[in-house]
């Protein structure tokens, strides 16, 4: 029978951690925030509640991130029966979940074509039809911010999926997979729904399907010497902060993540800060106020209180980007000493058990809710900050079914595959041409803090990589992203593509890690899946010339643009 021919693989609840980067083919636990329950009806009629019997598809995409949507839409447009499975109750990942300030403003937009450009043209038309004049034009490839409201992004993504004939299943988290030899046969969710396919695409931010399939991966930062990366390992570009950061027992205050200062260039298991991307409103008629959380403890914000007392001229603790509709996108400030991210407290998330991930997610939620109330009410907060925070509130018309709080945690970095080609700093900054390009990247290498260390006289934030931009364009150097970087090694899995947690070092990932690049890679993965099916080949053996022609026909740009 079928079960005798293959092998079921279940996510494991524990992994062997090392203080250097983690390499593992172990299987990953999968996570659904408790706020979202499996099986809840989706946001559109075409989102189906699939029955428990196995469902047969050509392409199975796991993770309705923007890359996942691009992959599913591309595969659907290539005539393949495609399903998009997502553990959360929202399609669109961070772009539907609060990230409304497009990172493409730091990229060579003339190389961002295909589904990425199409999405933004749809955004532009949506607002034009409403009589709203946006402060940019998609046809003009300059570096003005391209912005949109989260619900607009979600609705447009759903429309594109529907038009492409994609089956969308929300609220279904991966439980196990089955492989026959080196090929995935199906994935099963926690509720017992089973999705069989010819080619699978992992577009999660965490890399959960990749890990469950037995593909090797890394978590953490390489040391500077491993790949001769000047930007690798521990780094101290931020100035130290002089401040008393210990309590009466001499212990570090909350939100100090470490006490040992590693030498520059040393690798470890740390990753860049997570946070939420908030959608705030300045319109009193469209605001939900910041209220006192049930478990609010002002002592938790003693570090913030002391910092603001010592540095009262601090302008802000949140980066705010103007959006349509009198709204702001609230982001963790990469250049700020204190902001809305929990620096250094996320290292266990990528490989964590469901309960451990839930605890980390909850900690980020509770921290932000308490911080906003603190900044609005605490007398230690300078008046200019209190006044600005009191003028904000959660946007009432965003995330209503999630209590107006962002439903997606900004997992800037999860697992990273060790695939057929391993991208490093030289591929991003120096050796930028590849024989098998599937898209162009150009975001500057950019990492948020990785830890906050107590020092003798204060603290220092460690791990930031500040972006280095080209000339007047203020973009990163364009480079070709190779197909081999999204394919596992053939001996590990022959019908899986991984465009988000692709094969790369921490430094290289710090450039690829933005939604525009992931959308490009996702679209190319969807087209590559169709090509593999049509050729009857493994993903590693796809005829690149045929794939390239198909990618160009789908609107992708494969050539490096000439930039000033």
Image (cartoon, helix red, strand yellow):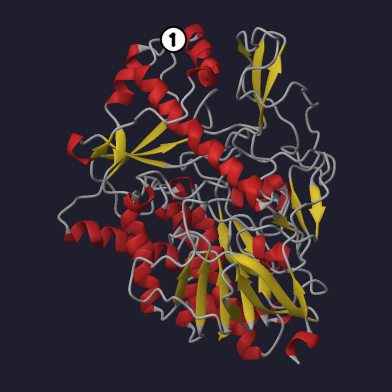
Residue 420 % position (x, y)? 77, 66
Name the residue at the front extreme. Answer: 294
Residue 169 % position (x, y)? 47, 71
* Residue 138 visible in the displayed image: no
Q: Which residue is mark 1?
A: 312
Viewer-nearest residue: 489 or 20: 20
Residue in the image at 50% along x and 60% along y: 65
Q: Quadrant of residue 287?
A: top left
Q: How many marks?
A: 1
Which of the image's four quarters has the N terminus? Answer: bottom right
Residue in the image at 30% along x and 59% along y: 123
Crowd rating for badge 1 (residues with CA inside 10 Å; few <14, some 14–19, many 20+): some
Residue in the image at 38% along x and 54% along y: 141
* Residue 436 relative to residue 78: left or right: right
Viewer-nearest residue: 296 or 61: 296
Residue 355 % position (x, y)? 64, 48
* Residue 233 visible in the displayed image: yes
Residue in the image at 62% along x and 8% along y: 244
Q: Quadrant of residue 28?
A: bottom right
């Amino acid at each position: 029978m079928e079960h005798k021919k293959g092998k079921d693989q279940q996510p494991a609840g524990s992994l062997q951690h090392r203080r250097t980067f983690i390499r593992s083919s172990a299987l990953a636990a999968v996570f659904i925030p408790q706020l979202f329950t499996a099986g809840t009806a989706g946001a559109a009629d075409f989102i189906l509640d699939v029955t428990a019997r196995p469902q047969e598809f050509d392409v199975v995409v796991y993770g309705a991130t923007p890359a996942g949507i691009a992959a599913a839409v591309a595969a659907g447009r290539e005539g393949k029966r495609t399903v998009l499975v997502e553990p959360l109750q929202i399609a669109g990942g961070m772009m539907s979940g609060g990230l409304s300030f497009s990172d493409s403003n730091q990229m060579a937009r003339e190389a961002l074509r295909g589904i990425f450009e199409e999405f933004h043209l749809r955004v532009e038309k949506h607002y034009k039809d409403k009589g709203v004049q946006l402060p940019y034009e998609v046809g003009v490839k300059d570096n003005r911010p391209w912005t949109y409201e989260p619900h607009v992004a979600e609705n447009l993504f759903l429309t594109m999926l529907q038009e492409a004939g994609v089956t969308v299943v929300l609220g279904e988290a991966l439980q196990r997979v089955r492989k026959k030899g080196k090929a995935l046969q199906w994935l099963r969710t926690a509720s017992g729904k089973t999705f069989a396919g010819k080619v699978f695409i992992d577009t999660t931010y965490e890399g959960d399907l990749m890990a469950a399939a037995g593909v090797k991966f890394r978590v953490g930062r390489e040391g500077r010497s491993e790949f001769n990366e000047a930007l690798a390992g521990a780094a101290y570009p931020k100035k130290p902060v002089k401040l008393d950061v210990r309590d009466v027992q001499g212990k570090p205050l909350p939100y100090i993540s470490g006490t040992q200062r590693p030498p520059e260039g040393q690798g470890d298991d740390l990753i860049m800060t997570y946070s939420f991307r908030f959608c705030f409103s300045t319109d009193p008629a469209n605001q939900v106020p910041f209220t006192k959380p049930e478990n609010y403890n002002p002592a938790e914000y003693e570090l913030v209180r002391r910092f603001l007392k010592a540095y009262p001229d601090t302008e802000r603790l949140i980066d705010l980007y103007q959006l349509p509709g009198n709204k702001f996108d609230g982001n963790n400030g990469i250049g700020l000493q204190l902001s809305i991210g929990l620096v250094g407290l996320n290292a266990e998330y990528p490989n964590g058990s469901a309960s451990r991930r839930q605890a980390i997610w909850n900690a980020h939620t509770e921290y932000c809710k308490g911080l906003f109330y603190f900044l609005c009410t605490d007398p230690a907060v300078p008046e200019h900050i209190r006044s600005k925070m009191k003028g904000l509130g959660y946007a009432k018309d965003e995330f209503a079914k999630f209590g107006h709080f962002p439903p997606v945690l900004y997992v800037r970095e999860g697992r990273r595959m060790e695939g057929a080609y391993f991208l490093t700093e030289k591929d991003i900054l120096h050796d930028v041409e590849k024989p098998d390009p599937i898209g162009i990247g150009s975001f500057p290498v950019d990492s948020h803090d990785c830890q906050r260390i107590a020092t003798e006289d204060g603290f220092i934030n460690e791990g930031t990589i500040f972006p280095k931009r080209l000339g007047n364009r203020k973009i990163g150097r364009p480079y070709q992203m190779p197909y081999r970087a999204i394919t596992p090694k053939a001996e590990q899995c022959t019908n899986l593509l991984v465009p988000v947690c692709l094969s790369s070092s921490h430094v290289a990932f710090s450039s690829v890690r933005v939604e525009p690049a992931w959308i490009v890679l996702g679209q190319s993965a969807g087209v590559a899946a169709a090509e593999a099916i049509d050729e009857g080949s493994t993903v590693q053996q796809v005829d690149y010339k045929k794939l390239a022609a198909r990618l160009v026909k789908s609107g992708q740009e494969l050539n490096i643009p000439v930039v000033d």
